[in-house]
Amino acid sequence: MRARLPCLLLIFLATAAGGGAADAASVRGEIVTLLSPNSAGGMMTRYARMIAPYIARHAGARDVRVRIMTGGGGIRGANALWFAEPDGRTIAFTSVTTLILSQLAGSEAVRFDATRFVYLGRAATEPRVLTVGAGSGIMSVRDARALGRPFVFPSQGTDEDFYSMAVLADVMGIPLKVISGYDGNADTALAVIKGDGDGHITGWSASQAVIEAGDEVPILTLGPERYPDYPDVPTALELVDGASLEAVQAIVNMLDMRRGFFGPPDLDPEATAELRAAIGAALGDPQLVADSVAQGLPLLPSPGEAEQIKIAQITEASQHLVPMLRAALEAIR
């Protein structure tokens, strides 16, 4: 009997260690870091900060702390997540569209494979809009083509707006000059209003105030249909056909995944299930819905399982965009 004791002790210790590993996969009682790879005052980070406490509540986590990790139009934060421990204690919230487009473009800064992230749920999406400065003299896409010089586009980095504008310019025959280094939508909007840039792409909700103030004019929407509040503004899909239509449709499809939560590759199944359930419950929480209305941050949730399926489908269908995206990236190097 005495000879068997060491063996039994080893079995007990191994079982205890295994139980600890299983517990570590749960986020209950833990501090979860939510990376926001966008500007501190931008729309994406505002969403992250608004939703984080509700995720903590529904996940039973001790806290969900938003960590700003700006850089490269979201790439820096996505790279950090790629190398994070897959235990559910580090997740991210940003534009999934940017990740796909950066990867397709062959950006040297990308260290991740967007298809291998574990998608936990989408908080919201909305059509994007191309607006121009009220004093620019540009009132339509036709005017942008007829400038007699490149259209000047202030950009905060190689994000979805940069790539979307690159595709639009390519298929619509608009010579383009990108000025990078701006810090978020407020910064690019100021450049457009001051006349340092001709136009920029943002979400309709982010543009509403400057449009209503008369500082910017919408000339094109990137969505499946015209924006209800501005029915005279055409969609990009209306202005192209053939292969160009396929390219624009691919961008529109990607933009549908915009504001999403995701975790590192090989995220533990227990943590994945907990986080997907918690994010789904948080986004349906009546108090969060009321907060979103009060803050002007509309919600349009989609479950993580559905977003996981989309990512593979969109990436495969978008291969014909690669030459345009890589040319755009090469032009700003």
Image (spheres, rainbow, N blue to C red):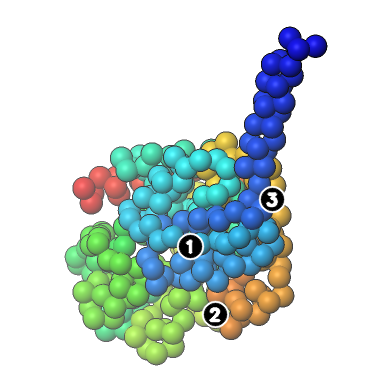
Tell me the quarter of the image containing the N terminus: top right
Extreme-top residue of the structure: 3
Disc on the earlier residue, 2 or 3 = 3
Mark number, residue 274: 3
Q: Residues within 10 Å of mark 3 (few under 14, many from 20)?
A: many
| 173 on left or right of 115 | left
Q: How many marks?
A: 3
Marks 2 and 3 in Cβ contact (< 8 Å): no
Q: Residue at position x 35%, y 78% from top?
A: 139
| Element under disc 1 | strand
Q: Earlier in the sequence, mark 3 or mark 1?
A: 1
Residues at circles 2 and 1 in contact by the CB criterion of under 8 Å: no
Q: Is residue 316 above or below residue 298?
A: above
Q: Determine which quarter of the picture holds residue 268.
A: top right
Left or right relative to 2: residue 66 = left
The numbered disc on residue 66 is 1
Locate residue 293: give its quadrant. Answer: bottom right
64 on left or right of 75: right
Q: x, y percentage for residue 120? A: 62, 51
Inspect this view and state whether residue 162 appears: no
The picture places residue 141, in percent across and down from the top left corner, at: 36, 69
Distance of mark 3 from mark 1, alpha carbons?
19 Å
Secondary structure of the residue carrying tag 2 is loop
Q: As displayed, is residue 202 above or below residue 207?
A: above
Residue situated in front as seen by the camera: 320 or 205: 205
Name the residue nearer the viewer: 267 or 182.
267
Q: Which mark is residue 237?
A: none
Residue at image mark 2: 296
Helix, strand or loop status at disc 3: helix
- Residue 157 in the image, given as x and y percentages of width and height: 31, 57
Residue type highlighted by circle 1: Val
- Callout 2, which amino acid? Gly
